[in-house]
Amino acid sequence: MRAIKRVPAGYGKVAVIEELERRLGITPDRMIYVGDGSSDVHVMLHVNNRDGFTIAVSENKQLARIAKSTVLSDNAFSIMVPILDQLLHWPTGDIRTLFESYGLALNEWEKERTDRVMISEIPSSSAPAEAEAA
């Protein structure tokens, strides 16, 4: 019989990951963890520190900085894209073919990490003193 165990957020999830690795004989570098919220921060750091692979599935800024990949999609199967691309090094065409074999079209795929930056001019009265001395 299989069951879902409810655990405390954060370090409770780390304990479950370690238990699964031990019970199933999985080495830490073979662990793939998918998370969507701040309660996943500790376990993502833990998995990353042990050479596992982490995927964020939300726009949570904390997770985006920690996760090795971020996937934003309405389809749960989309988490396979970074696994096939980054871990298994499948060519893009083969990934598209796999999706099509399941009746899914991979319409958009942006293979880039996005930095969100806002820049504005500093008013001249607030400019650093070093600039005035030059």
Image (spheres, grey):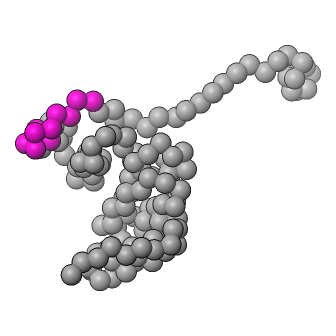
Name the residue located 59 percent from the left edge and 30 percent from the top edge.
117
Return the x and y of residue 45 as percentages of the image width and height. Answer: 50, 62
Q: Is residue 77 magenta?
A: no
Residue at image position (33%, 66%) is: 31
Relative to the observer, which residue lies in front, 34 or 30? 34
Question: Looking at the picture, how far across and down is residue 85, in whole percent?
Answer: 25, 46
Name the side, left or right, on which 92 lies relative to 11. Answer: left
Determine the main secondary structure of the stretch shown in magenta: loop
Q: Quadrant of the C terminus?
A: top right
Task: Judge whether residue 102 is colored magenta.
Answer: yes
- Reply above or below: 27 against 93: below
**Quarter of the picture holding the N terminus:** bottom left
Q: State whether residue 85 is above or below residue 127.
A: below
**As drawn, is 33 to the left or to the right of 94?**
right
The residue under the point 37% across, 61% down is 33
Q: Quadrant of residue 110?
A: top left
> What is the magenta range?
99-108
> Would you place residue 79 above or below residue 10 in this image?
above
- Which quadrant of the view contains residue 133? top right
Residue at (39% x, 35% y) in the render: 112
Q: Where 121 sits versus 22, above or below?
A: above
Is any atom of residue 126 visible in this view? Answer: yes
Tell which residue pokes out farthest to the top in this image: 124
Where residue 48 sits: x, y (%)? 44, 62
